[in-house]
Image (spheres, rainbow, N blue to C red):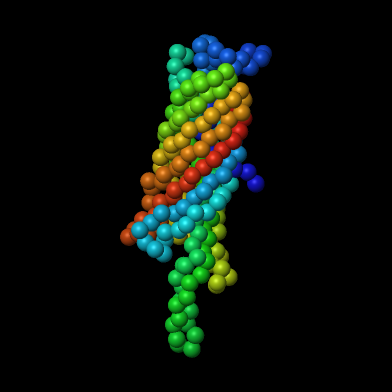
Amino acid sequence: MMVFAIAMPTFAQFDGNRNTKNRFNHSNVEQYYGVRLGYNLATINSSEASVDMNSYGGFAFGAVYGLQLANSTPLWLEAGLFYSEKGGKTYDFPSTRTTNDIVKEYFQKKTTRLIYLQAPIVVKYAFDVADDFYVQPFLGGYLALGIGGKTKLYEDKHSYDSFDDYHRLDGGIRIGCGVEYQMIYAEAGFDFGIANINDNDFVSARNQSFFFNVGVNF
């Protein structure tokens, strides 16, 4: 599997050969395309113990498109579309079992995998720190639609659709920084969910995720 993540700038142009020098001063430098593979370290954050979950690793992959906002400034708008795995896990999820009319409480491991089709959009600024090497901080947001995932209760040996417990629509803030050398790109950042994804009006839950992506810009 692959990992994806989302926002990366490629300040490149096609004029026969890819000119990485002086590309910000060239009138034809105005867009780029990129592919990304990444890894998410995600959690579900809540004030309710039964909803709050620990970190869970998942993969991501996708593609991005960047557009230079002004020829005189290395400021870029980047949008992407990703397959992105989030969720969480806990080892002390409370459950009950009734045997001979006696109710017993026990704890078990629970994992929740949330698979999203995620669309991030960020604004990036490229600092030229060396020949063909750029540092690119970015800030923006994301929207995501849940397309699958399983919740597993290990003691009960039972699984079900994760979106029986959570809303499919998510959204939040994205912040991070990328580096680019020629066509090679890498970035790290944080997605902070601001939408309440819990399917319970009285208890809120939000996705949070550190991400790391690598890829190529064209």
Which residue is found at the position 52% from the left and 18% from the top?
30
Residue 95 place in picture, x, y as percent: 46, 73
Q: Nearer the viewer, residue 70 or 56?
A: 56
Relative side of 172 to 37, left or right: left
Residue visible at 48% across and 89% down?
A: 100
The structure residue drawn at horizontal position 46% and vertical position 41%, both measured from the top left corner, is 190
Q: At 55% from the left edge and 12% from the top edge, which residue is drawn?
A: 22
Of the pair 200 and 35, the residue shown nearer to us: 35
Give whichever of 101, 88 is nearer the camera.
Answer: 88
Q: Position of residue 167 (x, y in %)?
A: 44, 53
Query: What is the x, y in percent for residue 96?
Result: 46, 76
In which quadrant of the rendered image does the C terminus lie?
top right
On the rendered structure, is 43 left or right of 2? Answer: left
The residue most toward the bottom is: 100
- For this orientation, the residue located farthest to the front is 130
Residue 80 appears in view: no
